[in-house]
Image (cartoon, grey):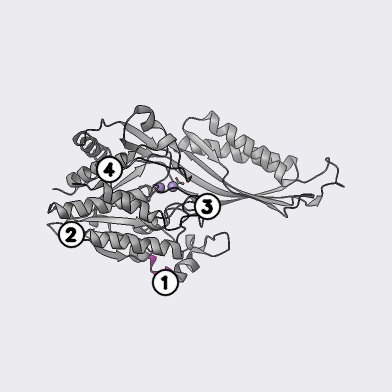
C-alpha cells in the first residue's frame, strides 16, 4: 500500500533544496536550484520504476506503461517550482504523491490498462517571469514564442533562461501532447484555504478553479523635492497608485468570490526626500465567475483613468497573463468521490481559489483532489498539512488513478 513515511521523507528532502536562511523555500524555474530539485525528483521516479525524460520545455516526466500500448495515458502532475519564500507542500506534494502511486502499483504488481505519466511541470507559479504554467501551456500546445519574451526582474527573457539551462526554445512545439494520447489529468494539491479545516475533513473534491488575470501597472509623474514642492500641483504617481489600490480592494470585497492583490511594487527613484517619479506594481485579480472578473476589471480601469487624469500622471497597463476560470470534469469528480469513500473520507466538493496547471488543458478532462491546509496558510513558510492528511490524499489519488487507468 501507499507508504506514507516514504512520501513524507521525500517531501522533507525536496524542501531542503532552495531552503532560505530567512525562511521558506525559493525555487525559480530554469535555475541551478530547480535543476537540483529535478535531479532528485528524477531519482525518485527511477526508484518507482518509471521511464524518465525531460521534454522540450523542461517538464520532467516519468512514465509507467499500461497493458495496452495503444491506450491514452492518465496524466498525474503538479510543480516543483515555488513562490519566493514559499512552503514545502504547494506543488511538491502532488508530484511526489504521483510518484508514490506509481511505486505502489509496481510493488503491488498491479498492471493497469492505460499508461500513467507523472509530470513535474515547468514554472507553474509564474514568480520569475509573470507568466505561470509554462510547462502545462507547452503540453497543451498554447505556449507562444512571443510569451517567451517576458522578462524576469533582471531583464532575462524566458527564451534566454531556457537556453541557459540547455533547452532550445525553438523546439517548444515538441512538448505538445496530442489529445488522442491523453485520457485525463489529475492532481493532488493542498487546499490553500480553510474550507476542509472548518469541515473537519482531511480531503475534498475540487469543482473548478478560479481564473487569474495578471497585469503590470506603470504610473509616471514628476519627481521633485519633498521639502520644496508644495502639496498643490505635485504629479505624484504613488499617491495615484494608493487611490487606485484602495478601489481595487473595495471592488474585490463588493463582488462574490473575487480577490485582488498587489504583490509587487517599486518606487523610483526611491529617496526619502524625493517625490516619486515613477511607480510600478502588479495586480492579480481572480474570480470563479469570468463575467464578474470582467466587470471588476472594467470598473478598476475606468476609475484608474479618472484618478490619473485628476492627478496629471500617466498610466500604462501591461498584460501579463489572463486565464479563464475552469470547471473540473463532472465524471472525474464522481470518480474522486468514490475514491474518497473507499478511503473512508466523506467527499465534499469545494472550489479552488488558487490556479493550477490543469487549467491549461481544454482537450481532455481534468480533476483535482485537495487536502486540508493548516489555518489556510500558503505561499508562506508556515504552509502546513499533516503527514496523515498527505497519506489520505495520496490514497485517494491512488484509487482515482486505479479507476481512471482501467478500461
Ligand atoms: C499559483 O499558486 C497561483 O494561484 O498563483
Ligand atoms: Mn501549486
Ligand atoms: Mn502556488
Q: CA distance from mark 1 to mark 2?
A: 28 Å
Viewer-nearest of discs 4 and 2:
4
User: Who's the residue at 77% across and 46% down the image?
Assistant: 235
Q: CA distance from mark 3 to mark 4?
A: 36 Å
Q: Magenta stretch: residue 264 in it?
A: no
Residue that numbered label 4 is attached to: 391
Q: Which residues are magenta?
A: 168-172
Q: CA distance from mark 3 to mark 2?
A: 38 Å
Q: Which percent across, then down, holds residue 136? A: 37, 55
Q: Answer above or below: position of 248 versus 23.
A: above
Q: Answer above or below: position of 346 versus 271.
A: above
- Tag 3 and tag 2, C-beta contact below 8 Å: no
Q: Which label belongs to residue 166?
A: 1
The CB of the residue at mark 4 lies under 8 Å from ligand 2:
no
Q: Answer above or below: position of 52 versus 377.
A: below
Q: Earlier in the sequence, mark 3 or mark 4?
A: 3
Q: CA distance from mark 4 to mark 1?
A: 36 Å
Residue that numbered label 3 is attached to: 320
Residue that numbered label 2 is attached to: 65
Q: Is residue 45 left or right of residue 37?
A: left
Are there few (<14), some (14-19), or many (20+) residues within 10 Å of tag 4? many
Amino acid at each position: 500500500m501507499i507508504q506514507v513515511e516514504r512520501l513524507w521523507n521525500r517531501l522533507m528532502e525536496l524542501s531542503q533544496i532552495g531552503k532560505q536562511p530567512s525562511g521558506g523555500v525559493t525555487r525559480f524555474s530554469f535555475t541551478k536550484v530547480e535543476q537540483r530539485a529535478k535531479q532528485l525528483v528524477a531519482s525518485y521516479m527511477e526508484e518507482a520504476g518509471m521511464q524518465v525524460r525531460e521534454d522540450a520545455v523542461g517538464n520532467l516526466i516519468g512514465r509507467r506503461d499500461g497493458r495496452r500500448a495503444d491506450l491514452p495515458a492518465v496524466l498525474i502532475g503538479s510543480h516543483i517550482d515555488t513562490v519566493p519564500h514559499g512552503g514545502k507542500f504547494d506543488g511538491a506534494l502532488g508530484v511526489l504523491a504521483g510518484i508514490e502511486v506509481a511505486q505502489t502499483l509496481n510493488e503491488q504488481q498491479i498492471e493497469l490498462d492505460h499508461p500513467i505519466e507523472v509530470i513535474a511541470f515547468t514554472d507553474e507559479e509564474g514568480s520569475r517571469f509573470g507568466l505561470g504554467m509554462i510547462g502545462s501551456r507547452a503540453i497543451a500546445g498554447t505556449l507562444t514564442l512571443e510569451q517567451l519574451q517576458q522578462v524576469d526582474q533582471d531583464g532575462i527573457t524566458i527564451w534566454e533562461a531556457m537556453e541557459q539551462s540547455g533547452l532550445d526554445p525553438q523546439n517548444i512545439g515538441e512538448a505538445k501532447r496530442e489529445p488522442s494520447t491523453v485520457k485525463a489529468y489529475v492532481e493532488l494539491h493542498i487546499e490553500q484555504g480553510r474550507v476542509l479545516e472548518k469541515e473537519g475533513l482531511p480531503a475534498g473534491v475540487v469543482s473548478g478553479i478560479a481564473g487569474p488575470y495578471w497585469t503590470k501597472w506603470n504610473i509616471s509623474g514628476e519627481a521633485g523635492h519633498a521639502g520644496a514642492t508644495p502639496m498643490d500641483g505635485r504629479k505624484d504617481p504613488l499617491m495615484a497608485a494608493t487611490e487606485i489600490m484602495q478601489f481595487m480592494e473595495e471592488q474585490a470585497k463588493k463582488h462574490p468570490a473575487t480577490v485582488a492583490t498587489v504583490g509587487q511594487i517599486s518606487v523610483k527613484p526611491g529617496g526619502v526626500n524625493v517625490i516619486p517619479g515613477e511607480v510600478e506594481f502588479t495586480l492579480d485579480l481572480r474570480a470563479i465567475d469570468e463575467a464578474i472578473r470582467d466587470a471588476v476589471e472594467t470598473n478598476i480601469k475606468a476609475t484608474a483613468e479618472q484618478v490619473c487624469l485628476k492627478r496629471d500622471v500617466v498610466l500604462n497597463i501591461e498584460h501579463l497573463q489572463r486565464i479563464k476560470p475552469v470547471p473540473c470534469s463532472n465524471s472525474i469528480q464522481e470518480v474522486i468521490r468514490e475514491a474518497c469513500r473507499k478511503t473512508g473520507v466523506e467527499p465534499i466538493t469545494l472550489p479552488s481559489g488558487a490556479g493550477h496547471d490543469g487549467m491549461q488543458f481544454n482537450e481532455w478532462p481534468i480533476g483535482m483532489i485537495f487536502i486540508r491546509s493548516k489555518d489556510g496558510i500558503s505561499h508562506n513558510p508556515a504552509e502546513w498539512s499533516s503527514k496523515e492528511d498527505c497519506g489520505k490524499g495520496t490514497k485517494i489519488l491512488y484509487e482515482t488513478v486505479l479507476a481512471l487507468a482501467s478500461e
